[in-house]
Image: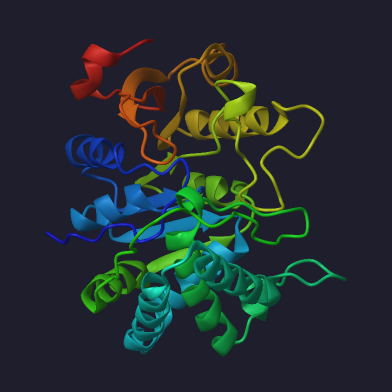
């Protein structure tokens, strides 16, 4: 069994939920050989499945071009040591800086260099395929450094696609080992990584027999202040109707239900999510799971979040958590 962990922090990441999904796959989906994840993010669920060697074929997708470029570059680079050396050098340099002002200068210089690769004032951000090999490697290095040094490991961009998260308040940043990055690269090497709207992977899920799909979209907000969907300039909330994209996802989930595909969708356990993703649907199984938050957790509090697992198949080991 491998022990590959996500090396990118991601808001809404599923490190706590990942072992639950892996156990479900192990106990209930032994006949499935293809894993599909339309909202990849930090990839915690996939890496846990990979560690348990549960799927032969993997298709993943995300809408954030900088993130997809990072994964493709790490997955296919011939010299992982080159990326590791550059990351280690920059983080060691950051750790050696004593004053807040020096660290700010370092961080905002890195952020500016990163955005210069991606933001064109007169056009849209480049597609992943439009970055040359040298720029792709540089982008991967800078993204990792930003992810480790920015506030709470968040990824947020402005309307032009520029990364705009401020500096965090870390004393020392851990340096990844070469083995960690090599193992991470190996785990991604046999995946097919897509950039764009999630619907194409929904369609692929329906086409491929013996597949399992895990949907981890931007969640229905618990409150107005907790809403965060701006991972890319192509936000999950791009109309005046704040529920429009959630409703579109619910309609796509209906297609998975109707095709009898094996799929699980997770979301916040609140009345709006129940209304959008559960009410009026038949042949689904809904379970309540308590998850401890990592990003944004409050010191001294339990900071747990009640989440829904909405499945197209029954999960016997979660029978005690079943809602409907």
Query: In the visual, does 245 lie left or right of 81?
Result: right
Q: Position of residue 138 (x, y in %)?
A: 53, 81
Furthest toward the right, the residue is 122
- Residue 224, image quadrant: top right
Which is more toward the observer, 10 or 245? 10
Residue depicted at 44% across the width and 37% down the height: 296
- Residue 242, image quadrant: top right
Q: Quadrant of the N terminus?
A: bottom left
Q: Position of residue 315 (x, y in %)?
A: 26, 25
Query: In the visual, does 309 lie left or right of 65?
Result: left
Picture layout, residue 26 above or below residue 285: below
Q: Position of residue 235 (x, y in %)?
A: 69, 45
Picture layout, residue 60 above or below residue 138: above
Q: Quadrant of the C terminus?
A: top left
Residue depicted at 61% across the width and 49% down the height: 231
Residue 147 visible somewhere in the drawing: yes
Picture layout, residue 209 above or below residue 246: below
Q: Position of residue 78 (x, y in %)?
A: 37, 89
Which is more toward the observer, 28 or 102? 102
- Residue 173, image quadrant: bottom left
Which is more toward the observer, 300 or 132? 300
Query: In the visual, does 88 lie left or right of 23?
Result: right
Residue depicted at 62% across the width and 40% down the height: 229
Residue 41 visible somewhere in the drawing: no
Furthest toward the left, the residue is 1
């Amino acid at each position: 069994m491998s022990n590959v962990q996500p090396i990118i922090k991601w808001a809404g990441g599923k490190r706590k939920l990942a072992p639950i999904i892996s156990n479900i796959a192990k106990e209930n989906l032994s006949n499935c050989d293809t894993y599909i994840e339309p909202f990849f993010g930090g990839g915690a669920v996939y890496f846990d499945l990979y560690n348990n060697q549960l799927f032969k074929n993997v298709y993943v997708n995300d809408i954030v071009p900088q993130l997809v470029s990072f994964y493709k570059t790490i997955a296919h680079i011939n010299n992982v040591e080159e990326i590791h050396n550059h990351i280690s050098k920059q983080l060691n340099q950051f750790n050696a800086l004593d004053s807040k002002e020096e660290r700010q200068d370092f961080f905002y210089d890195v952020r500016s260099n990163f955005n210069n690769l991606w933001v064109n004032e007169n056009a849209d951000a480049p597609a992943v395929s439009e970055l040359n090999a040298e720029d792709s490697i540089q982008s991967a290095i800078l993204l990792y450094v930003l992810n480790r040094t920015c506030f709470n490991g968040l990824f947020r961009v402005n309307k032009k696609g520029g990364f705009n998260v401020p500096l965090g308040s870390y004393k020392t940043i851990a340096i990844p080992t070469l083995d960690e990055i090599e193992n991470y690269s190996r785990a991604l090497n046999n995946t097919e990584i897509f950039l764009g709207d999630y619907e194409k992977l929904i369609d692929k899920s329906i086409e491929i027999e013996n597949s399992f799909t895990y949907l981890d979209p931007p969640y229905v907000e618990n409150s107005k202040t907790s809403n965060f969907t701006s991972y890319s300039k192509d936000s999950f909330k791009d109309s005046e109707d704040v529920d429009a994209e959630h409703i579109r996802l619910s309609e796509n989930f209906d297609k998975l239900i109707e095709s009898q595909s094996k799929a699980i969708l997770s979301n916040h356990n609140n009345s709006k999510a129940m209304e959008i993703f559960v009410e009026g649907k038949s042949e689904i199984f809904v379970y309540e799971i308590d998850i401890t938050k990592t990003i944004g957790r409050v010191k001294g509090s339990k900071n747990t979040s009640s989440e829904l697992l909405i499945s197209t198949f029954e999960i016997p080991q979660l029978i005690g958590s079943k809602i409907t």
